[in-house]
Image: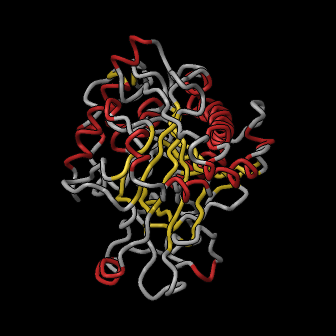
Amino acid sequence: MSCSTPPSSHLVVVDFEDISDASKVLTAELERAFGGHLSSSSSSDAASPLGIIAIRNIPDFVEAKNAFLPMAHALAHLSPEYYKALEDPTSFYNAGWSHGKEKLGDKPDFAKASYYFNPLTDAPGTQDEREKYPASYPCNKWPNEDDLPQLKDFKQSAQKLGKIMHQTVAHVAKHIDVMAAKKVVGYRKDLLFDAMKHTEKAKGRLLYYYPIDKDQTATTTQAKEDNWIGWHNDSGFLTSLAGDLFLDDETGQPLSSDQIDPEAGLYVTNRSGESIHVKIPDDCMAVQIGECVQILTGGVVVATPHCVRGPRAGFGASDVKVARISCPCFIDSKPSFPLTLPEACTSENACQAGIGRDKVPLLEERWVENGMTFGSFLQKSFEKYYDWSS
C-alpha cells in the first residue's frame, strides 16, 4: 500500500466566509472532499476524496487552539492521585480522564491518554436521558484549577475552542444538506443542520500521545502505520479536528519540523485505497465525516478510515521523546435520533459506498435496521470495535 500523496489526492481547503454563507454553492468542493457513490468525483480519475475538509479564517479559532492544546502536557503529567477524581466509570470513561481504559482488540491502550469534555453544557439532556444513556450524556468532570495552577483557565479554554468547533460544524452540515438534497430523492431539508445546530451531544477529546518505546519503534513502525491509534471510522455524525502539536514530552516545548519524523501523524484511506498522510494547516480546522452521515445521505458522503502513525526510529531528533497532542470534537445528535435512509436509497447504497472495508468493522454488521437509533448503533459499534482485529 502506498504512503505517498499522489496528485489525485489533496486536502480541500475552503474559507470560513464561504462555509458560513448558506447561499454559497459549495457542492463541488464537498464532492472533492467527501465524495460517495452518487458524487461525480467518485467516478473521475481527477480526484480521490479523502473524507476530510479544512476551513481557514475561522474567527478566534487559532488563538483558542493555541491556548488550549498545550495544556494537555500538564494534564498528562499530573501526580497519579489526581486522576482518580477525574475518572468517570459510570459513563464508560466518556467524561474526564481515560488512560488504559479503552481497547481495540484484547489489549488496553496505554499509548495515549484522553480527557473528554462537553463544551456546550456541563449536564446534557434530561436526568432521565442521562440515566438511560450514560455514555452519550455524561456530566463534565473538570480539573480543580485551584489545586492545579498549571491548568489555570483550562475549563474556559476548553469550552471556547469546543464551541467554535461546534458552530463551524453546523455550517458544514448546512452545505452537506444542500448537496444531499440535490443527489437523492427524499432527503429532508436541513436534516443534518438541525441535528447539529441544536444538539447538546458534543464530545471534545483532548488527546496526549505518549512517546513510543524505542524498542517497539525499532521493531514495528516500519511495517505498521497505525501504531499510535489504530485504523477506524468515526461512528457518529461529524468530527471537527483542531490539527495537532508535536512536542518534547519531558519539557513540553513544541518541536520544529526538523525534529519530527515527516511521516508521523494522521493518515486516511482515499477512494483509491491508498493510505495518505494528511497534514492539516496550522491555521485551519478540519471536518471529517462519520458513518451516521453516510447512512443519512445514502452514501452521498462517505466516512473515511483513518489512523495515527507515531515517529519512526532514526527520524527527527534522536535525543527527544516525541509526544503529540490533538483535540477532535465529535458533534452528534441525541441518542434517540433514527438513522433512516432517504426514500430513494437502499442499505446497499449506504454500506457499499464505504471504503477500507478490510480495515474497519463492516457497517452492515452494526447498522442492522433502517431507522435504528443512533444510541443503539453506537453501542453496537463499540461492541464490534472492542473485539475487532485486522
Classify the position of the C terminus by image quarter. Answer: bottom left
User: As drawn, is 157 to the left or to the right of 216?
Assistant: right
| Residue 279 in view of the camera | yes
Residue at 39% x, 64% y: name it.
228
User: As drawn, is 290 to the left or to the right of 253?
Assistant: left
The image quadrant that residue 111 belongs to is bottom left
Residue at 56% x, 43% y: name it.
147
Residue 305 at x, y percent in the picture: 40, 54
User: As drawn, is 288 to the left or to the right of 390?
Assistant: right
The correct choice, above or below, for 169 with respect to 58 in the image is above
Classify the position of the N terminus by image quarter. Answer: bottom left
Residue 108 at x, y percent in the picture: 26, 54
The image quadrant that residue 296 belongs to is top left
* Image mark count: 0
Residue 22 at x, y percent in the picture: 75, 30
Residue at 40% x, 28% y: name it.
136
Q: Nearer the viewer, residue 278 or 80?
A: 80
Residue at 66% x, 35% y: name it.
163
**Colour scheme in the image?**
secondary structure
The correct choice, above or below, for 125 with respect to 51 in the image is above
Q: Nearer the viewer, residue 310 or 82?
A: 82
| Residue 291 in view of the camera | no
The correct choice, above or below, for 240 with respect to 174 in the image is below
Q: Residue furthest front?
A: 147
Q: Nearer the viewer, residue 210 or 332?
A: 210
Residue 181 at x, y percent in the picture: 58, 27
